[in-house]
Image (spheres, rainbow, N blue to C red):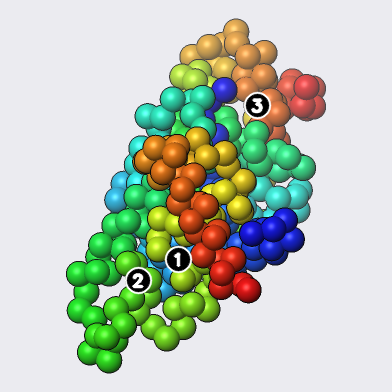
């Protein structure tokens, strides 16, 4: 099987990638991250082995771009008013930071792990590959994230 | 987290509103991809009296015009991906001129096209046939035998006919000796 046209790849996976990035970096940075993800994917695309798991590959790129966005955000000056309440690593520095998704209150790695487990329904082994960590660490991130969410829900 | 809470969370995440329409991010992506030299084939669709028409261009010009029926889009794009490059995006803004000229043609405001055409996908023989048949003026016809003679293959009228009448391009300005298409 040859690689599908890139547009076909987007038609299949873009909506899910956008939701993943919205969940992980927040709505303010999601589109920038998404564009960077797509451009990086497009750059590497023709050289991919045709039997690649394109969905997992795309999530891996998106996760890296989300980390880049988090670092860029950390370098930006924090408004004085927020000085006593610095945003959780990578979270938007706005009062609405908890509103965009139920998992916004979690640290980014837990957000990613919870999203990939719960919304994408990937096994821990694949989540680990996307997050570039051990299977045990991926399992712990998802469990810890879900435990904290449960506390908030009750 | 119990099963019910899990289901609620899954639904919330799967339906997470990103506030972004694909038309908006798609346009921006195509622009940036083109700027960075990452867009090898741009395509768009144009309505025509014979149904939807897919128009694709590469860096050198128009590479493909194809009438679409259900499911054809994937077939055409997959073929382009295999033969040219998989870096293909729907990018109507990159095909403004092609779309405008085609629409004018279908609405009878235009008889000639002046957009660059890239015959890379046609073989050497087909490219010569197409170059010759493109020179037949609007409202005129020629025959397979005449076209064959003009391109230096006087005995290849049948091969010319096959080029003029495959599933992709029906050239109505070229006819058999009796005045009919095969």
Alpha carbon of mark 2 to alpha carbon of mark 3: how far? 65 Å
Task: Judge if badges 1 and 3 mark residues of a common chain.
Answer: no
Give how far across and how far down residue A52 sits, in percent: 49, 29
Q: Are marks 2 and 3 in contact (CB under 8 Å)?
A: no
Mark 1 residue crowding within 10 angstroms, few (<14) / some (14–19) / many (20+): many
Q: Residue at x 37, y 29 (%)?
A: A47
Give how far across and how far down residue B152 sits, in percent: 49, 14
In which chain is the residue bearing label 1?
A
Mark 2 residue crowding within 10 angstroms, few (<14) / some (14–19) / many (20+): some
Q: Which residue is mark 1?
A: A106
Q: Are marks 2 and 1 in contact (CB under 8 Å)?
A: yes
State the quadrant of the C terminus of chain B: top right
> Which tag, 2 or 1, sits closer to the chain's start?
2
Q: Secondary structure at mark 1?
A: loop
Residue B114 lies, with reference to residue A2, above or below; the image says below
Give how far across and how far down residue B168 sits, in percent: 66, 32
Task: Judge if badges 2 and 3 mark residues of a common chain.
Answer: no
Residue B62 can be seen in this image: no
Residue closest to the eye, A36 or B140: A36
Alpha carbon of mark 2 to alpha carbon of mark 1: how far? 8 Å
Q: Which residue is mark 3?
A: B164
Q: Which residue is mark 2?
A: A88
Nearer the camera: disc 2 or disc 3? 2
Horizontal placement of A154 versus A69: left or right?
Answer: right
Asked where in the image residue B165 lies, by quadrant, the reply is top right
Q: Secondary structure at mark 3?
A: helix
Q: Secondary structure at mark 2?
A: loop
Give how far across and how far down residue A44 sits, in percent: 36, 37
Nearer the camera: disc 1 or disc 3? 1
Q: Residue at x 45, y 65 (%)?
A: A106
In which chain is the residue bearing label 2?
A
Horizontal placement of B150 versus B139: left or right?
Answer: left
């Amino acid at each position: 099987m040859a690689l599908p046209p890139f547009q076909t790849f987007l038609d299949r996976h873009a909506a899910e990638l956008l939701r993943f990035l919205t969940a992980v970096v927040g709505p303010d940075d999601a589109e920038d991250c998404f564009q960077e993800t797509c451009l990086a994917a497009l750059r590497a695309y023709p050289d991919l082995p045709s039997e690649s798991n394109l969905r997992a590959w795309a999530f891996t790129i998106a996760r890296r771009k989300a980390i880049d966005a988090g670092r860029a955000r950390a370098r930006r000056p924090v408004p004085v008013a927020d000085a006593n309440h610095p945003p959780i690593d990578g979270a938007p520095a706005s009062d609405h930071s908890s509103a965009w998704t139920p998992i916004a209150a979690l640290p980014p790695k837990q957000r990613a792990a919870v999203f990939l487990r719960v919304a994408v329904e990937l096994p821990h082994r694949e989540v680990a590959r996307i997050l570039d960590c051990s299977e045990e660490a991926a399992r712990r991130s998802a469990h810890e994230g879900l435990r904290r969410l449960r506390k908030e829900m009750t | 987290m119990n099963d019910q809470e899990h289901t609620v969370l899954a639904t919330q995440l799967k339906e997470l509103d990103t506030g972004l329409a694909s038309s908006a991010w798609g346009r921006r992506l195509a622009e940036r991809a083109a700027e960075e030299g990452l867009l090898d084939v741009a395509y768009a669709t144009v309505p025509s009296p014979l149904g939807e028409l897919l128009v694709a261009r590469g860096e050198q010009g128009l590479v493909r015009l194809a009438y679409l029926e259900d499911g054809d889009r994937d077939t055409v794009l997959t073929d382009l991906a295999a033969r040219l490059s998989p870096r293909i995006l729907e990018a109507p803004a990159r095909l403004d001129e092609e779309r405008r000229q085609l629409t004018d043609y279908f609405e009878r405001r235009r008889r000639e096209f002046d957009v660059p055409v890239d015959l890379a996908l046609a073989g050497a023989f087909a490219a010569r046939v197409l170059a010759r048949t493109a020179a037949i003026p609007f409202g005129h016809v020629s025959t397979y035998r005449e076209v064959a003679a003009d391109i230096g293959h006087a005995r290849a009228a049948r091969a010319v006919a096959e080029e003029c009448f495959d599933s992709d391009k029906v050239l109505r300005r070229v006819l058999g000796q009796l005045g009919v298409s095969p």
